[in-house]
Image: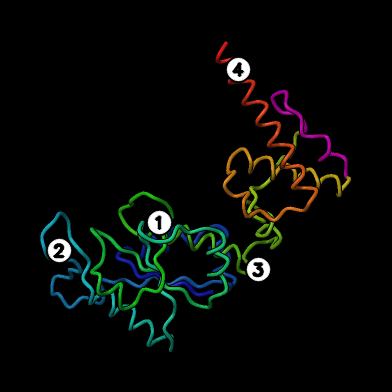
Amino acid sequence: MNYHILTLFPEMVLEGLNTSIIGRAVDKGLLSIEAVNIRDYTKEKHGHVDDAPYGGGAGMVMQAAPVCDAYEDLCRKLGKRPRVLYMTPQGRVFNQKIAKELSAEEDLVFLCGHYEGIDERALELIVTDCLSIGDYVLTGGELPAMVMIDCISRLVPGVLNNDVSAEIESFHDNLLEYPQYTRPEVYAGMRVPEVLLSGHHKNIETWRRQQSIKRTLERRPDLLAEANLSKKEQKYLEELRREQKKELSSIFENVLK
């Protein structure tokens, strides 16, 4: 997987990504991360890449030419026109499904805006996908790009020491991950669940699936609509929902007393 980040702050993304698991994957040749400085493509003698918006308004807008020229130069070097992801709160909200789709690409370009955004003409000319990491505004697209690259990279074969981890963590089968424990067996008076100490792999797997279902119901019930559950697991979920309704009814009755 090859990442190409069009940015005004190359040091920011390179220093953030060339560490930990992602950095080791780069060292192994499983990933490559290139930061393209958009400032290198301005023809303005003072190195400016922004100007005041037509029609007035606060702030400055990144000009179309440096952005497009940076991308076109990259295309010439690669010999193809890779997918361009524009980081914007107006885009589709990034999720695990999108990450899996993007992990199949050989090259991905991340376009990071700044100031009040980028001239719309550049976006129309080169952008293929508008993506967001949430309904809030940041000072630039670098942090969202780094978040997405981290997430996508975990799905690239060989990046994780244990590739199974990428499949069983949160959002696998649209369920949140089950609780995890390690030594000691007792901490602050709280014991590790006995089933995890039993060595009975089938019972442990069943417990973990049930805990994933329970946690998803408690924290992200919206995910359950598309969860991949067996008939037995669906029955377990229905029992949890009935218990949840009883608890809510009991709380409501106590409030009225």
The total of numbered circles placed on residues is 4
Residue drawn at x 78%, y 34% is 193
Q: Residue at x 37, y 67 (%)?
A: 86
Please report whichever mark, 4 or 1, sits nearer to the chain's N-terminal start.
Answer: 1
Q: Amino acid type of disc 3?
A: Gly
Q: Which mark is residue 158?
A: 3
Residue type at mark 1?
Leu
Relative horizontal placement of residue 206, taking residue 101 as reference (left or right): right
Mark toward the viewer: 3 or 2: 2
Q: Are marks 3 and 1 in contact (CB under 8 Å)?
A: no
* Labelled disc at residue 253: 4
- Between the residue at mark 4 and the residue at mark 1, the CA separation in whole angstroms equals 47 Å
Left or right of residue 46: residue 232:
right
The secondary element bearing badge 3 is classed as loop
Asked if 250 appears above or below 84 in the picture, the reply is above
Q: Secondary structure at mark 2?
A: loop
Q: Residue 247's x, y, as percent?
A: 66, 25
Left or right for 250, reference 128 = right
Residue designated by label 2: 53
Q: Mark 1 or mark 3, which is nearer the start of the sequence?
A: 1
Q: Which mark is residue 143?
A: 1
Circle 3 or circle 1, nearest the eye:
1
Q: Nearer the viewer, mark 2 or mark 4?
A: 4
Residue 136 % position (x, y): 36, 49
Q: Quadrant of the N terminus?
A: bottom right
Span shown in magenta:
185-199
